[in-house]
Amino acid sequence: MQKIRPDMDLGKNIQQLRNNSKMTQDQVVAKMNIMGLNISKSTYAKLETNRMNIRVSELVALKIIFDAEFNDFFEDLILK
């Protein structure tokens, strides 16, 4: 299972995309679960705060949910 390591602050971009979509964390989690991803609100919150690796399947789901481009997730990131 491929994961993106949290060596960059993806979480702030995920949170910004969610806010731009005017969605709550609960709404995003519900959509991810409908898409077949078993994720809890606490796990999703960890993604937004970079306390957990994001799976590629989760990133793809968020791209669809937010109607975003992959570049949107990596915008303005600096390697740590």
Image (tube, helix red, strand yellow):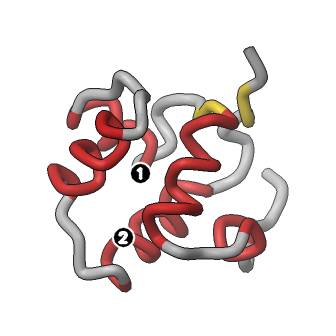
Residue 28, quarter of the rendered image: bottom left
Residue farthest to the right, as pictured: 79
Residue 18 is marked as: 2
Query: Which is more toward the observer, 44 or 64?
Result: 64
Residue at coordinates 31% horizontally, 78% vertically from top-left?
A: 19
Whether tag 2 and tag 1 are in contact, CB under 8 A, the answer is yes
Query: Which is more toward the observer, 63 or 52?
Result: 63
**Whether residue 48 is situated above or below residue 21 in the rendered picture:** above
| Label 2 secondary element | helix
Q: Is residue 74 left or right of residue 30?
A: right
**Whether residue 67 is situated above or below residue 48 in the rendered picture:** below
Image spot of residue 21 (x, y percent): 34, 80
**Whether residue 48 is situated above or below residue 20 in the rendered picture:** above
Mark 1 is surrounded, within 10 Å at the Cα level, by few (under 14), some (14 to 19) or many (20 or more) other residues, namely many
Q: Which residue is mark 1?
A: 48
Residue at coordinates 59% horizontally, 30% vertically from top-left?
A: 53
Q: Which comes before the other along the chain, label 2 or label 1?
A: 2
| Label 1 secondary element | helix
Amino acid marked by disc 1: Glu
Image spot of residue 73 (x, y percent): 65, 66
Image spot of residue 31 (x, y percent): 30, 49
Residue 63, quarter of the rendered image: bottom right
Mark 2 is surrounded, within 10 Å at the Cα level, by few (under 14), some (14 to 19) or many (20 or more) other residues, namely some
Q: Is residue 4 left or right of residue 15?
A: right
Query: How far separated are the C-alphas under marks 2 and 1?
Result: 10 Å
Q: Is residue 64 left or right of residue 74?
A: left
Residue farthest to the top, as pictured: 1
Residue 15 is marked as: none
Image spot of residue 68 (x, y percent): 59, 75
Q: Is residue 70 left or right of residue 60?
A: right
